[in-house]
Image: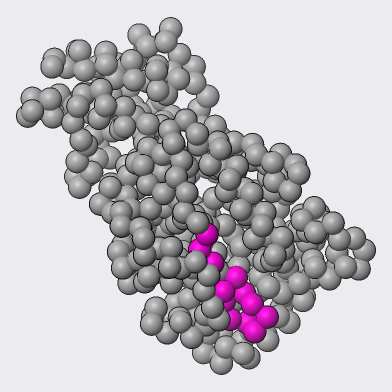
């Protein structure tokens, strides 16, 4: 008998924490009226306090950053603290800045790298990103560049009430919750119509849809789904990231598109992992997975 | 193509493409529920449905029209047999 997967609608959430609450999302969103510099300054203050409130997450990200950077002692402590500060700023933007009309978002972009690569793509493709920087903003900005519908695949939120703060359809962006297994048929259809599917490729799902690859020298589970979808439909994967810069504006990076042949999906995941390592080496404190990425299911 | 023949072809797909245990194909009937999360289902996940839709297109020689609502057609083996049979008849 085949191994039954727990890919879809999985009950356990190894990345969850007790501060994933609608009232906190609402509070952050209500601060959206503040001028952005002031709001981000406030976010930084909250980010400095946060590690004391979430000691397990602090320990996990500290271990992760040690693996990413080889830092120790006070240097590692500083990186750990900065990860919470960076996260607080990106989260503040997620629930406020990101919700502005797309035409206004350009003001928050300091630069782009490789966006011209999208112009050569005439058919459907999979925009592949990770929980690094302001990933959701990357999706919104690139949807504008592509001038075609973008279907953003998201995990079912633990609490339905959270969705209103982080999901907003419109302007060519449609959120697709991975709540039903047959949702994959909708994604196949979208890609065949020449549309874009945006998906995050850094959180394993805890079933046979994961594969182990080397990530910073240790085996880590990564999801195969985006790569199986790409190979099945015959569309390229386009890695894209949105990173916070020193001036608190964003750098949008689009890497070289690549294709995956049927049967070579694991090689695709490995290539993605190597690329993700490069991005994370450059921006280690913008890695926003506050759990043990190498053993996520032991939590 | 007759419904019985379609069912046998779908069973073959499940063994060949979804790695279903061949010794248990006799348990698969028209009433067998497919998607994970439904009571008594085989537990097919999103990746299985991608694989299955591609295999159906290759095996039966038609393109699945995804502009339609497909969820109900993939709900059970019986629904899927009816869907495939209908398309084979229309060809």
Q: Residue at x 50, y 27 (%)?
A: A4
Look at the picture and state if A129 lies above or below B78.
below
Place of residue A9 in the rendered image (x, y in percent of width and height, measured from the top left): 48, 44
Q: Quadrant of residue A84?
A: bottom right
- Tell me if residue A94 can be seen: no
Q: Which residues are magenta?
A: A243-255
Place of residue B43 in the rendered image (x, y in percent of width and height, measured from the top left): 43, 29
Is residue B45 rendered to the left or right of residue A242? left
Q: Quadrant of residue B54?
A: top left
Residue most toward the right? A73
> Which residue is at the front of the view, A14 or A278?
A278
Q: Quadrant of residue A90?
A: bottom right
> Which residue is at the front of the view, A43 or A273?
A273
Is residue B79 rendered to the left or right of residue A36? left
Q: Quadrant of the C terminus of chain A?
A: top right
Look at the picture and state if B26 lies above or below A198.
above
Q: Is residue A298 magenta?
A: no
Looking at the image, how many numbered discs can be counted on the residues? 0
Place of residue A68 in the rendered image (x, y in percent of width and height, measured from the top left): 77, 56
Look at the picture and state if A97 lies above or below A155.
below
- Tell me if residue A45 can be seen: yes
> Which residue is at the front of the view, B17 or A36?
B17
Q: Residue at x 40, y 23 (%)?
A: B17
Q: Residue at x 36, y 71 (%)?
A: A144
Look at the picture and state if A90 lies above or below A5.
below
Q: Residue at x 41, y 39 (%)?
A: A231
Q: Is residue A249 magenta?
A: yes
């Amino acid at each position: 008998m085949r191994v039954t997967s727990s890919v879809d609608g999985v009950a356990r959430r190894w990345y969850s924490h007790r501060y994933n609450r609608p009232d906190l999302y609402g509070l952050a969103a209500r601060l959206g009226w503040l001028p952005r510099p002031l709001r981000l300054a406030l976010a930084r203050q909250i980010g400095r306090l946060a590690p004391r409130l979430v000691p397990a997450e602090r320990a996990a990200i500290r271990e992760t950053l040690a693996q990413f950077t080889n830092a120790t002692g006070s240097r590692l402590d500083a990186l750990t603290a900065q990860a919470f500060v960076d996260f607080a700023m990106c989260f503040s933007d997620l629930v406020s800045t990101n919700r502005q009309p797309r035409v206004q978002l350009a003001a928050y972009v300091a630069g782009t790298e490789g966006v011209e690569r999208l112009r050569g793509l005439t058919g459907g493709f999979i925009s592949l990103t990770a929980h690094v920087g302001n990933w959701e903003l990357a999706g919104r900005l690139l949807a504008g560049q592509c001038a075609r519908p973008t279907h953003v695949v998201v995990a079912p939120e633990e609490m339905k009430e959270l969705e209103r703060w982080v999901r907003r359809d419109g302007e060519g962006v449609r959120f697709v919750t991975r709540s039903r297994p047959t949702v994959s048929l909708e994604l196949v259809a979208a890609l065949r119509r020449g549309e874009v599917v945006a998906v995050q490729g850094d959180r394993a799902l805890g079933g046979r849809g994961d594969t182990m690859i080397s990530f910073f020298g240790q085996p880590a589970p990564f999801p195969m789904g985006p790569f199986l979808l790409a190979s099945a439909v015959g569309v390229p994967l386009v890695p894209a990231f949105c990173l916070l810069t020193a001036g608190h504006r964003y750098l949008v990076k689009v890497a070289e598109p690549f294709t995956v042949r049927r049967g070579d999906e694991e090689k695709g995941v490995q290539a993605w992992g190597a690329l993700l390592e490069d991005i994370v080496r450059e921006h280690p404190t913008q890695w926003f997975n506050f759990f043990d990425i190498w053993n996520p299911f032991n939590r | 193509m007759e419904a019985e023949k379609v069912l046998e072809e779908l069973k073959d797909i499940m063994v060949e493409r979804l790695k279903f245990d061949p010794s248990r194909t006799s348990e698969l009937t028209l009433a067998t529920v497919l998607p994970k999360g439904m009571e008594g289902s085989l537990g097919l996940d999103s990746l299985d449905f991608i694989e299955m839709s591609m295999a159906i297109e290759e095996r039966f020689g038609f393109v699945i029209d995804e502009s339609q609502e497909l969820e109900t057609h993939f709900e059970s083996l019986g629904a899927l047999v009816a869907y495939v049979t209908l398309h084979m008849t229309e060809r």
